[in-house]
Image: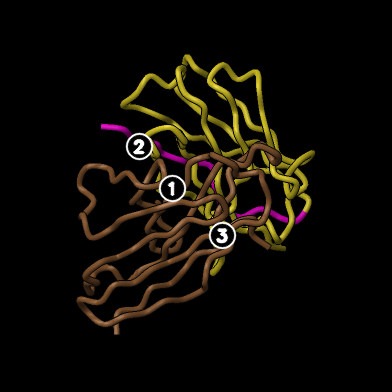
């Protein structure tokens, strides 16, 4: 059972907006920043969002992030076929003294 | 260019041991905390260990505490994971990673496969 809860799947047609949620029920995450990764299973994750809503250089601006007290969201605006992949949220957990990851969301482009 | 290259994976028997290495280049290794993260087949990412930049603070996930030991050599720019008392549930791709919660420096190795089976 992941500390961070994500839906197992999401889908949309090209051009649609897809939102992936990441929620938690403890105060362990608190004000810690949430990151989002894109990953082909078994390969190195690619950072999409850091510090809740910041995009590294090179990440398309159709990816955006936000965070509230008990959840975070990754939005893909204008879904493209190459966005079909797995997405994970992550944050540092002060109580566990370690990184925690969501279970991952598989995005399918219909 | 930042590079993290893991090695040392392979097949181990239940109860056996393996030592993973991660050689780092492209940044001042001694200045940064490091982590090991694994991914079992068909599963999500699981953080398993953290080590501070100087190597004097280590944290572990419950699933590996007491069996795995993280260490580093800041002269050799290398991170290590000694894995003892291996179990089938430890079968996974293991990644070394620099994960900085305060900025965009999240760097990952390509991963190394560990298979625990008789």
A75 to the left or right of B44:
left
Query: Where is mark 1, residue-wise?
Result: A35
Magenta residues span B1-14
Q: Chain of mark 2?
A: B
SS for callout 3? strand
Image location of residue A27, percent across then percent down: 66, 46
The stretch drawn in magenta includes residue B8: yes
Chain letter for the residue marked with disc 3 in the picture: A
Residue B3 part of the magenta-drawn span: yes
Work out whether residue A52 or residue A99 is closer to the camera in this orientation and state it.
A52
The relative height of residue B70 versus residue A10 in the rendered view (above or below) is above
Residue A34 point in image, percent of width and height: 47, 47
Foreground pick, A104 / B25: A104
For disc 1, the chain is: A
C-alpha separation, residue under disc 3 versus residue under disc 2:
22 Å
Task: Identify residue for label 2.
Answer: B104
Task: Give the chain coloured yellow.
Answer: B
Q: Are marks 1 and 3 on the same chain?
A: yes
Q: Nearer the viewer, residue B57 or A97?
A: A97
CB atoms of marks 3 and 2 within 8 Å: no
Which disc is residue B88 wearing? none
Assign the C terminus of chain A to one quadrant of the image. Answer: bottom left
Mark 3, residue position: A23
Circle nearer the viewer, 1 or 3: 3
Q: Residue at x 22, y 42 (%)?
A: A57
Q: Nearer the viewer, mark 3 or mark 2?
A: 3
Dot 1 or dot 3: first in sequence order is 3
């Amino acid at each position: 059972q992941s500390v961070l809860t994500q839906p197992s799947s999401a889908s949309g047609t090209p051009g649609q907006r897809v939102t992936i949620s990441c929620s938690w029920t403890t105060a362990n995450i608190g004000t810690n920043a949430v990151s989002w990764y894109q990953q082909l299973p078994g390969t190195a994750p690619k950072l999409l969002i850091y510090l809740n809503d910041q995009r590294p250089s090179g990440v398309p601006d159709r990816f955006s992030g936000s965070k509230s007290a008990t959840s975070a969201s990754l939005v893909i605006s204008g879904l493209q076929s190459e966005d079909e992949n797995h997405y994970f949220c992550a944050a540092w957990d002060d109580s566990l003294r370690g990184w925690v990851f969501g279970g991952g969301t598989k995005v399918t482009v219909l | 260019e930042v590079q993290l290259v893991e090695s040392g994976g392979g097949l181990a028997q239940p109860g056996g041991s393996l030592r993973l290495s991660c050689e780092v280049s492209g940044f001042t290794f001694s200045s940064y905390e490091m982590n090991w993260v694994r991914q079992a087949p068909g599963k999500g990412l699981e953080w398993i260990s953290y080590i501070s930049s100087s190597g004097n603070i280590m944290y572990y996930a419950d699933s590996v505490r007491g069996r795995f030991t993280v260490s580093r050599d800041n002269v050799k720019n290398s991170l290590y994971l000694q894995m003892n008392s291996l179990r089938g549930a430890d079968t996974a791709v293991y990644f070394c990673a620099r994960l900085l919660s305060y900025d965009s420096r999240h760097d990952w190795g390509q991963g190394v496969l560990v298979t625990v089976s008789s």
